[in-house]
Each structure stands twice: as C-alpha cells, then as structure tokens.
Amino acid sequence: MSLSRQQELAQLFRGFLAHESVIDAPTSLVAYECDGLSAYRQTPLLVVLPETIEQVQQIVQLCNERGVPIVSRGAGTSLSGGAMPHKDGIVLCLAKMNRILRLDALSRTVVVEPGVRNLAVSEAANPFGLYYAPDPSSQIACSIGGNVAENAGGVHCLKYGLTLHNVLGVKLVTVNGELLDIDQQSMQSQGFDLLALVIGSEGMLGVVVEVTLKLLPIPECARVVMGVFNSVENAGDSVTGIIVEGIIPAGVEMMDNLAIRAAEAFVHAGYPVEAEAILICELDGTEEEAESQIARVETVMKTAGATETRLARDEAERLLIWSGRKAAFPAVGRLSPDYYCIDGTIPRKALATVLREIRRLSEQYELRIANVFHAGDGNLHPLILYDANNPGELEKTEELGSKILRFCIEQGGTITGEHGVGVEKLGEMCVQFSDQERNQFHAIRQAFDPKCIFNPGKAIPTMARCAEHNAMHVHEGKLPFPELERF
Amino acid sequence: MQQSIADNNLEAELAASVAQAVANGTALQIVGGGSKSFYGNPVEAEALEVGGHSGIIDYDPAELVITLRAGCKLDQVEALLSENNQMLGFEPLHLGDNATIGGAIASGLAGPRRAYAGGVRDFLLGVKLLSGRGEILNFGGRVIKNVAGFDVSRLMVGAQGTLGIILEASLRVIPCFETELTLGFEHSSAAAHIQWINELGSKPLPLSASCWYQGRSYIRLSGSQQGVDSAVAKLEGTAETDIWKQLREQKHDFFTAYDKILRLSLPQTREDLFSAEPQLIEWGGAQRWLSGGLELTQLRQKAEGLDGTVCAYRGVDPETGFFHPLNDSILALHRALKSSFDPVGIFNPGRLYSEL
C-alpha cells in the first residue's frame, strides 16, 4: 500500500513543485530520517522542499484532504526528535525558504523566511549596529523556523529572553491552507495571544512561513569574569549572590569538573582542570557600567568561596573563556562514543540538591555525567556518556535521564527548558501534567488541526500512552513484557 | 505602613461556583478589583467575585520569581517587591486602589516600560486556571525557561477571563534600577518625534519609556548610575520631572482634558495621519492616544491601512465593538479556542468580542 501511496503523492506534489523538490528515492530519504537526536529514526514517505508560501499552502491543503501527516523541518538540529519523520507522512522541509526579506534598521525589525539560519540574522543586522539576541549553541546551523517551533533559548536568556520575547510576528499556514498574519509589532495583542501559543508549539498548530524578529542594539561593551570553585555548591551560591546584588548578567554559565576537563582538553581555554566548578559570568552595557558590575561580581564570587577569579583583559581573552563553554558538547562527545543531553530546568535554589542527586544516579547506573548549565536561569544540561554499541546501554541511559527529569519536576522545575518535548520526553509529560491538563493541550491542538495531521505523535502524549507509561513506572525498572519494543 | 497581603484561599468555593454554573449553563461575569471594568464590552451575567482569593504562595527574591493568588492587590504586591528592591517589569496600570494582579494579567494592560522591557506576557511564567469544565489546571511553571506543552499561561494575557479564571500566577520580577531620570526635548511634530525616538532605539541607551505631547518629547532613562550618566552626557535634553506614573495611571493632562479617547496601536514607525487631532504618543510610536472629532469606523479603516487597530477606549460609541474587529479566519480560531477551554460558554460572554 505504502509504495503506491508514495508514488501517488509524489505525482501530485510534482504537479506544482520542481521534480527535484520532491524526494522519493530511498537513498535520499535516509538523510531526513532523524534530527539532532539520532537515537530516534524513521524514514518518511516523502520529503518536499517548497520555495514559496503558495507552495506550502498547496502542500498542506493536499495533505489535509488526504489525511497525510506533515512533519515540518528546518535545519534538523532539534535535540528532542521534534523533526523525526512519520512513517506514513511527509517531511515538509523549509530549507529552501531561506531569504532575509526586509531589514528595517529604524524599527529594528527584520522579516525572514523560516529557513534562514539564526546566526545569519545577526550577521545581516551587524552593519546597522544591531543583532538578534537568542543564540542557541547550534546557531551556526539552526533555522529561525525551528527556533520558533521550539522557543529556542541560548546563553543570554536571563537578560534578553527566549525566542518568545524576540519574535514580533509570524505568518502561519493553517491546516486548511489559509495564511494567517499573527502580528504583534504594535505590542498590543488583538484578542488572544496567538503568537505566544504558536511559539514553542513544536510544529503542531501550523506551518510558520515568515517570521518578524526584533533586533537589539549591540551593547557598547561586554566583559567576562571566570570564577573557580572547589565545590559546585559555592558556585551555585555565587549565582544567587549576583542576583541578590540586583545584577542581571548577560550570561552566567556553570561547568562541573568532568565538563571542565573535557573542554580544556579540546580547546585549551586555560580552564583550571582541578576545579570542581567554574562559573563564567558576562556583563554588558556601557564601559563604565560593565566595569563597575564586573568588580561587584568578582567580590560576590570571592565571598561565596571562589578560590580564584579571572578577568578577561581583552576581547581575545573573553572569547577564549567562552570557547570552552561553547565547545562543551563536542568536547564531552570526545570522552565517549555517545552522549545524551538532558534539558531539565529547576529553581536555582535547588541546584545543589539536584546536582547531588545526579551524582548519586550516575554512580547507581555506572554512567558518567558531565554537567554544563545555564546557571542564571536554572537550565541544566547534564550530558550522560554512554556507548550505544553496548547492548542495553541506550535504554539504561534513557532511564537515567528520565529519573533526572522526574527529580527536576519534584524540585518545582520542568522537563524541558529549551529543547522541546519532541518524541523524547513524552513519558515525562505524563508525569508533569495531569490527564485534564493534557486533554486541554489536545483540545487546543484540535482547535487548529481537527484531524491532527501536523506532527502527530509528538510533544503531547495520548491518554493511552500515559496510562501505559504510568503503569510501567509503578514497577520501577521491572518492565512488564520486557521483550516488547517500546517507543 | 504597608498592609500585609491577606492569605485567603477561595479555590474550593470558586470551583464549586463554576461547577454549578457549568451544570446550569449560567453565564458568569468575573469580577476582581473592578478597576478595569470599563476596558471591554459590557457583560450581562451573574457576577462572580474573585478578588478575595489572595495570598503569596512563594516568593524568594533570589529566584526572581513570585507566585501568588490572583486576587492580590497590585499596590501591595509592588510594596512587597520593593522591600526586596525588586519590581514588576511591565509597569502594570492600576487605574484604581483595588486593582489586582489577576486583573493586570487578564487585561494585559502594561505601562510606559512596555516598549523597552516587555509586556505582561513577557513576564508571566505560569498560571493555575479554573477552566470552563470546572477543572483546576496548571500550565507553565515557576522557572524562567520552560517549553513543556503549549504556552497556555500567556494565552490568558488579554483574554479578559474568557478562557477561565486565573487562580494563581507565577511572574518573573526584575531588580529595581539604581537610578532613573527624565529628559525633555523639543519636537514640533509627531512625525519628528517618531523618527527621533526610533533612531534613539537603535543605540545602546538605557531607555525605559518615551512620550510625545504638544510638541515635546520625554524619555526616561533607567539603569546603573554609570549607564544613565553616560547616556545623559550623550543626549542634549533638559531635565524634567517624572511624568511616568501620572501617564501610566492616565492622570496626565491629555487624559483629564478629553472625555473621548481612542487608542491606536500600530507598528512603531508608521506615519502619523492624525496631526490635526489631539494626540499623545507612547511606546516609541506603537501606542497613540487620540481625541477630537474622529469617527470610529473611519478611523478603524485608516488604521488598517497602517497595519494598526483601534480600541474605543473611553467616551466613544463602540458601534463595531470596543476592540478592533478580528478578521474571519482569526475569529474562527478564537471561537474554537474559546470552546476548548469553556465549552458551555459561561465566562464573560461578549467581553472581548460579541461572538465569543
């Protein structure tokens, strides 16, 4: 059935798309079978690459009429499997819609197509003294459309916000193929705040085909100080101390010993490899402002027990200090054949408790964990090191990850700060939300997409799935019918 | 002395009232402090008082987050934050002593800082909601970064209670600024002001508010002493008294001089088509208050040409509704969303639009 369906659809799409914009050859489809979370794979029926809004409208209309699932995809850098294909559906890849349409320096806005890379926006804005604030670590590759779908963050969220705070409008193709203009450039939403609802909706409410972004003036000056600590608790106390001082740093990042050693071996940033934790704190503003704040931050760090503080004396040193943090994921990747990134967020005060629990779980599961996190906003990225070639190790890793996330929920936090739920955290969604809450999510989705053709099976688990998940959880590690595959 | 915030949990009573209303199909008018009752279409329904549901659930200044019951009085919340050298980032409009935090969220009315720091939605992190199914639901959370599930909490901002009763909210708070000051500049026309204020916006200056009225531009600078000092040195303005609280509370001359007031919302750099009318401009040009002989329907047509909308704010016959009408597709989505939260249609019928 599948083959003829595939050919029938391919023919329909080729009625209005260029031949090469409809991918049906098995060897080419393989390239789309996963996103940044490569442990989850699925070959789609077809991949289509539209170049215009009208083409997107036609594709969606056609799929809706025939009940064909649509998985929208930008650059495919999602870390939660949000862009993993559906076996009976198409991947709607927006990579060819990658033009910056209008940049208006006076209103500090830029209108882009969804396939534009995050970093390309700041590069285009730079000649005007402007930039786009959200900077997920994948910013060289990730697309704005994907950023909107996931409400992407980055290292500067505490001061400059998430994608949500920096998007002024979107054009959305609805399931009927209609084009909606959801605009908040006037800063006053008309009726319900549909923009907030669409941002972070993981491609389940429509296809974003145009985005208006807010640009900010580039700060006059940015200074960085690194604090060295012999305990993660002291590093955590420093972060609290900085906030209590009334300072909102542009970024505050923490790394633990394993992450420090990995980063140092990889990029030679001059990190102290014996330290239990380092804190990298960036302050920006005018020269005088940054100077005075950085001195206050240094004092706070010392008071909280920093054994040393290092001030970047120039731009080269600032970039060097950052280089280790920015390369932390690939650096940790060198320690082990595979690693698994967790994205829990907790109230900052729970930091020490959560880190202790992570250490305990790491020992219990005999898997090493490197901790890198956005300390300012409590967003943790424990990286679990494992080897997928060892039978059962991926499953063990996922179970460990799930325990960390459950602990984050218990501490008043959330299972995902910026990576999204995707396919990865469906089980934990059953823990964080009640049946009624999840029902409300489903009801919202159906208000937009009654047949649920947009990204089915992602982000919001079904009742049946949660019933199964919660039943399994009762038996703690002893799964009923262990021989069955579970997705 | 500041009154302490009453700890008064009415959740069970409110849930029971809603359950009964759902069972009987009785429409409810949600009433908090009543300070913003003018803001929207009148609702003809049984009043449900929610303002007594008050109390702080959690506030640890080091977390920059406060979780509180929606009936908490705005002035008391602001006093509590101020004791800890913190504040609400969106500078909410009170418009009366009884203004509540729930009303600030439901109305979505943010003050002069809106254009520079963000609106109510930008600071809201989570809500506990009493839905039109009589269910108590939690969305969002108490942490700054959270992308689990759809962003239902922010959908409550400006929804005026039509989707449910906000029982509790978690809000991000910000530290108070070290210093603030106001500068004035001559700009004879609105057009000159709009050009100038947007050019300023492209520079790394600690701007936190702007206003133009009767040929004069006003800006507020907020930040560290050094940051504000260096900005003052770059700008050649004259020192002015603080007009911002007056402006926020709509006690500024413009609001007292005219009975009829329309609010034009549009992208900030759009041209000024109303130079003949009395006008006060805020938010870098995105919020323009108008009075004079303008006719609502005609004004709405003109506004649409500027990608703008018009609210029949005060003293205007709202022939085509208090808020600017939505187009058919967006209205259909609103209806579908409304019924997903409130299937029987008991909450504030007609408040936003007659069709909801």
Image (spheres, coloured by chain):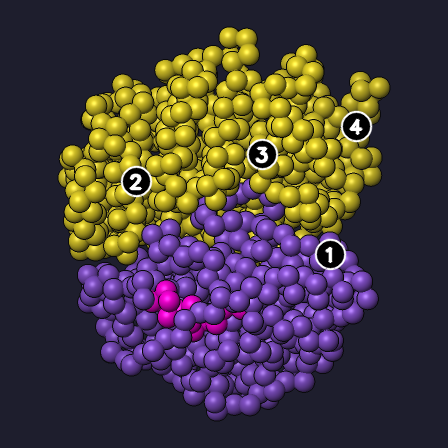
Chain colours: A yellow, B purple
Tag 2 or tag 3, which sits nearer the N-term? 2
Q: Chain of mark 3?
A: A
The dominant secondary structure in magenta is helix
Left or right, B139 with reference to A69: left
Quadrant of the rendering where the C terminus of chain A is positioned: top right
Give the CA distance from mark 4 to mark 1: 41 Å
Above or below A364: residue B28: below
Can residue A58 be seen here? The reply is no
| Chain of the residue under the numbered disc 2 shown in the image | A
Give me the C-alpha separation between circle 2 and circle 1: 42 Å
**Residue B133 bears which disc, if any?**
1
Residue A425 x, y percent position in the rendering: 58, 32
Quick one: quadrant of the N terminus of chain A?
A: top right
Q: Is residue B17 magenta?
A: no
Does residue B84 appear to the left or right of A298 in the view shown? right
Magenta stretch contains residue B81: yes
Callouts 4 and 3 on one subunit: yes
